[in-house]
Amino acid sequence: MGCSCFKSASNKSTAFDRRRRVSARIGVSARRLDTHPVIVFVFGGPGSRKGMIVDSIVSSFGFVHVNIGEIFNKELERFRPPPPTTSSLPAPRGDAMRDLRAMLDGNADRFTMYWLTNALTSRVREDTNATYLVDIIPNLKPMMRAKFLTEECSNVMGEFHAKFPISFALNLAVPSDRILQAKDMLSSSSGAMQETGGRGDEADASKLERRAGLYDQITRNLLGYFETNGMLVTVDVTGGLSGVIWQKVHQLLCDLEFHPLHSVGTVILFEFDQSDWSHFDLEKYAMELVPLEEVVVNGGGNLDGGLEPQLRILSRYIDSRANHADAFVVRSEGSRLPSKTSLSSTSMTSLSRKPPLMFTDIGEDYLENYLQGRPKDYVPSGGDRKYKSISSMDNEVYLFPLGSSDAFCRYIAYVMATSRAENAFA
């Protein structure tokens, strides 16, 4: 593949490379504890991509997400007066925020760190065999002003830790002096924020800085507790793209002996002869080469046993590598797959009898546009190669050489997706 380039802010071409650096610090006592339940706290302020990271951890590693905001919303239902009998509609969101603020302001003696850890104790006792990811600072404006969160908390957290040992706290850190840099990076990587110029930008920047300052105030004691006890794992998310940050968090969790159930957002590229795959710089693209013939034989399969059994063995192998890679090049030489331009009538009949899965339409695109860590402003160069692509609704991407038939692509994508779904629940 030719040199893949994107345009930087200075209009200079920079080589496409997924090996961006995201720094992390691991406390001396941070590890997965051999206790039940397993508990990890997570922190992340404005611009930290906490929502995306939490969703990916839950999906990939099977954590149970405990959002303290949900606990407070349940408590709110006990304090809120019943709605008029003439209306069965829930309160508008604005009213819910107002009621939550009033509940916190009017019951300062009730809502303390002791109350919060007791509520958390009740929640984790529901399943003591689970692995919990506790988001103790929810993204709710009234909660961001909850005075009890600023209390000195070492004693109460120590008591909770004595009952339910905490493995560590994951802190997705954005230093206060770099919050605007994080905003700009978030804009360039996801398009979630758009720069418009003028006073609007200044107002947005001021608002973001105020939110960041408030977040720092309410988390200072909590983060201090974990740092003092060597239980803090800090990832500096300021300069990284969302996909690269997730790669770093994923690798940290694997290093701390958490085992993913499957990869999130896997990219699988099928190549059918040496001329297809020999050009790859696997290190630059952070992709793992998978020799299908070897995988099938080592997996107890029969190379003459048909296409579907080989693909099922391949799917199990890829899921077993979830803690090592999220993108793969499958070299099918020697595996005796049918021609990439056709499938047997038996295979197509088998596919037509199966329930449908949700896939996007087959398209054509560049590999770089599917890899996590691609900048939003990436522009392919003239030497890049296009592939046929098909994606599942679970964000799994399957790529094939342009000469492959649509039926061939759909069949492989279907078998791989169904097999991986079965693996996840096995």
Image (tube, rainbow, N blue to C red):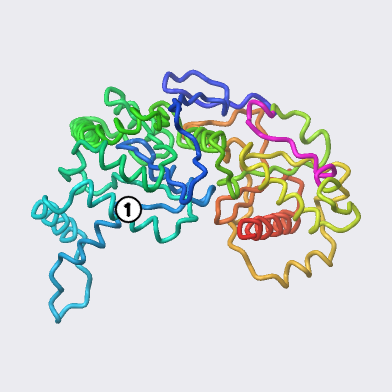
Pick the quarter of the image with the N terminus. Answer: top right
Tell me if residue 117 comes above or below residue 235 in the rendering. Answer: below
Left or right: 148 as drawn, with respect to 47: left
Left or right: 167 as drawn, with respect to 96: right
- Asked if residue 5 shows in the view, the reply is yes
Asked whether 288 falls inside the magenta stretch, the response is yes
Q: Secondary structure at mark 1?
A: helix
The percent coordinates of residue 425 (x first, y second) are 61, 60
- Asked if residue 366 shows in the view, the reply is no
Name the residue rendered at 53%, 35% in the picture. Answer: 256
For the residue carrying disc 1, how many other residues have a C-alpha within 10 Å: few (<14), some (14-19), or many (20+)? Answer: some
Tell me if residue 185 comes above or below residue 91 in the rendering. Answer: above
Disc 1 marks which amino acid?
Answer: Leu
Name the residue rendered at 78%, 36% in the picture. Answer: 276
The percent coordinates of residue 385 (x first, y second) are 68, 35
Name the residue rendered at 55%, 42% in the picture. Answer: 258
Q: Nearer the viewer, residue 21 or 198?
A: 21
Magenta part of the chain: 282-295
Query: Farthest residue toward the right?
Result: 304
Query: Farthest residue toward the bottom?
Result: 86
